[in-house]
Amino acid sequence: MKDKTLFEEDLKKLQKIVEELSSGKITLGESLKKYEEGVKIAQACSATLAEAERKVELLMKKDGKVSLENFEPADEEEK
């Protein structure tokens, strides 16, 4: 449940950044900082979604029957 909470918080942060950038009320320097922060948050959200997708694939993998296999997050698999 902690991952979901962090994901939801990141989405809210990302939405706030988009609103701030769209407002046109911040300086170019602030815009660049916000954009960089937004890219980092978007990458983190993308990684979270990819991990969730891999978990679902593991659950649905065996002949359409739900089964659970050991799951190692991508970061640990690459090591």
Image (spheres, rainbow, N blue to C red):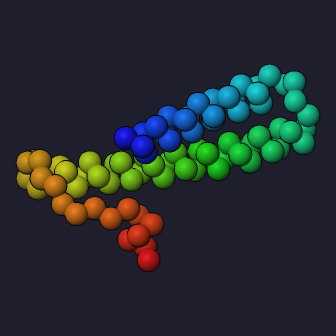
Residue found 50% across the figure and 41% down from its top: 6
Q: Nearer the viewer, residue 51 or 62?
A: 51
Q: Nearer the viewer, residue 74 or 5?
A: 5
Relative height, residue 55 to residue 29 (above, below): below
Q: Position of residue 29 (x, y in %)?
A: 90, 42
Name, please, the residue furthest toward the bottom: 79
Residue 23 left/right relative to 59: right
Q: Position of residue 46 (x, y in %)?
A: 50, 48
Relative height, residue 22 to residue 39 (above, below): above
The quarter of the image holding the N terminus is top left
Q: Quadrant of residue 10?
A: top right
Residue found 36% across the figure and 48% down from its top: 52
Residue 52 left/right relative to 26: left
Relative height, residue 25 to residue 69 (above, below): above
Residue found 82% across the figure and 44% down from its top: 32
Residue 6 left/right relative to 66: right
Q: Position of residue 34 (x, y in %)?
A: 77, 40
Name, please, the residue furthest toward the front: 2
The quarter of the image holding the C terminus is bottom left
